[in-house]
Amino acid sequence: MKINNILKTVFLSILASVVFFVISSMAIDDGHIENNFSISGTVLFPKNSKFGDSVCITADSAKSETIGGTQVFFSGSFVEQYTIEDLTIADDYIVFVWSDQFKTELYKKADRIETAKRIDTSKPSARVVNFVLKEGSDYAGM
């Protein structure tokens, strides 16, 4: 009888820990539970980059109405890491890098939003997005 009570206590303790872990890994916003996901990767800067050059990486989901982004600065290492955090789960994120110093690039080198590869934040392997910057700007005039 005592062994059953001990096993029951251990089981309930483990169950409570699992439930706490699941709940603590979710954010609650306006009464809705939203999962926290991220997209990360690298940005490869061109050889003529200067300290302080920067780019913005943006992830946008129409389905979940979520947009997130981060800014990356060239610090002397031609490969810089980035992470966009606090994204909701969705399978239609469009990720792109843009700047006034380098050409805008959609993920998987798409030339239009319609052909850009969508990122599914529910799949860990799909949440790694790398960019290779090209010299020049998309802006003309001034």
Image: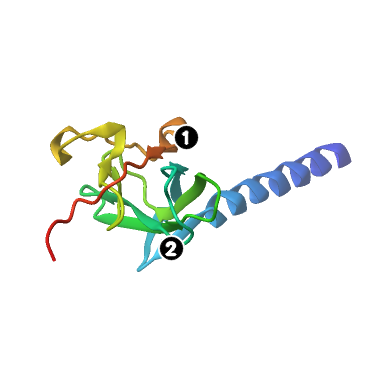
Question: Left or right: where does residue 2 sit relative to residue 106?
Answer: right
Question: Left or right: where does residue 96 sit relative to residue 22?
Answer: left
In this figure, which residue is indicated by the disc labeled 1?
124
Residue ID at (83%, 43%)? 6
Q: Amino acid at mark 2?
A: Ile
Single out the residue that lies furthest toward the front: 48
Q: Secondary structure at mark 1?
A: helix
Residue ID at (77%, 47%)? 9
Number of marks present in the image shown: 2
Badge 1 crowding class, 10 Å Cα cut-off, few under 14, some 14 to 19, many 20 or more, is: few
In this figure, which residue is indicated by the disc labeled 2?
28
Q: Amino acid at mark 1?
A: Pro
Q: Position of residue 69 (x, y in %)?
A: 36, 57
Q: Quadrant of the N terminus?
A: top right
Question: Left or right: where does residue 101 sit relative to residue 48?
Answer: left
Q: Position of residue 45 (x, y in %)?
A: 43, 45
Question: For residue 134, what is the image quadrant?
Answer: top left
- Coloring scheme of the render? rainbow
Q: Quadrant of the C terminus?
A: bottom left
Question: For residue 101, what is the image quadrant?
Answer: bottom left
Nearer to me, 49 or 85: 49
Q: Is residue 81 above or below residue 114?
A: below
Q: Position of residue 117 (x, y in %)?
A: 26, 33
